[in-house]
Image: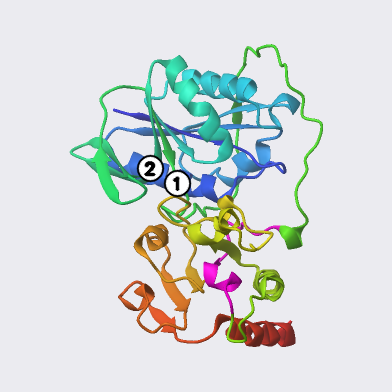
Amino acid sequence: METILFLAFTEADGSLSKLALETLASAQSLAASLPGSKLLAGLVGATIQPAADSIAACGASRILGVCGAEFAQSRYSTDAAASEAIAKAAAASIILAPAGSRANRTLAGVAQRLGGRIDTHVTALAAAEGKLAVTRWYYRQRMEGTLSRTSRPWVVLLESGCAEAYAGPSGSATVEGVLVALPAIRTEVTGLKSPPADQQTIRPDAKLLFVAGAGWTKKQPDGQAHPAEAEQLILGFLSRAQASLGSTKSLVDLSGEGQEVLKFMTHLNQIGQTGATPRHQKGLATCCHGEEPHTVGWRFINERRAINLNAACSWAQGKADVLYVADSFEVMRKVNALLGASS
């Protein structure tokens, strides 16, 4: 019999993120698949009652919580102490948590404190012969492996997009407060700094991923490169469509070759074998050729489209659902004009 603990950190307004709700849905399904198992929930944050009420009907036999101003911001010492206290109060054998920044930086240490084991970047859960088995990717998402453990407690961090988010009705939940022996707090959060909304290019929850390749900075039919216009077209589309921005490795590395680069492009935007593996509903690749190191990062994109002047590029070899043989500059000028007219 397993005691499954869904553990999550609340948002600034006391709610749960979409990733947390996806993890809760996976926890529910797992509890239903393992005979004799019970589901508990654990919440950490400045305020947790709104989150608890939103999952009141999830089937958790207990909702444990740690709240207060000390837990408003991500801090290893306080997050680890709160997570450890909840895990011990729940006597959890399996701890499922969303693979957000707070859990990723904290729960490996918590697993060590509990004498347990941890697996990260998990993409699927299954009950095989009455035991939990997890699936995750290895070698830059080129190899998939399934594993199980006998060690307990077992901490599992689930990636985004692996399950439908929990959407049960809200209610009035009773939260059991858990006492935490706080360590000496040596860091102080004095504020948050973030770029203006129109400068934000990485949007994990966007429906569309727009990927720019090195062709945007190459010479165009008039024999000249137009990086300034490329920036205007790309940023204009991102703003109008609220899409997320990706790039190929060649584009973010062009500065090392003495070529002009798009000023807003960094390695954080890189998609592929040495970059990110996003999970957007749709993807549009422009001015890139669809080579394997790049397209390996597209494996979880549901609908792939590309714009390229070369009809024989790698996108045409079964790597894109639709290939538009056209000039990306011309296409995006027209698209931006249409989006501007409809807004």
User: What is the C-alpha distance between the residues marked 2 and 1?
Assistant: 6 Å
Name the residue rendered at 45%, 46% in the picture: 159
User: Mark 2 or 1 closer to N-term?
Assistant: 2
In magenta segment, residue 17: no
Q: Residue furthest right?
A: 190
Camera-nearest residue between 327 and 240: 327
In magenta segment, residue 212: yes
In the rendered image, which residue does mark 2 sit on?
A: 122
Please state the total of marks drawn on the protein image: 2
Camera-nearest residue between 189 and 126: 189
| Labelled pair 2, 1 in contact (Cβ < 8 Å) | yes
320, above or below 149, in the image: below
From the top left corner, tell me how far across and down residue 76 is, in percent: 61, 24
Q: Amino acid at mark 2?
A: Val
From the top left corner, tell me how far across and down residue 225 is, in percent: 64, 75
- Residue 129 seen anywhere in this rendered image of the structure: yes
Q: Amino acid at mark 1?
A: Glu
- 70 vs 203, left or right, is right
Name the residue rendered at 45%, 56% in the picture: 164
In the rendered image, which residue does mark 1 sit on?
A: 159
Residue 148 in which image quadrant: top left
Q: What quarter of the picture does the N terminus occupy?
A: top left
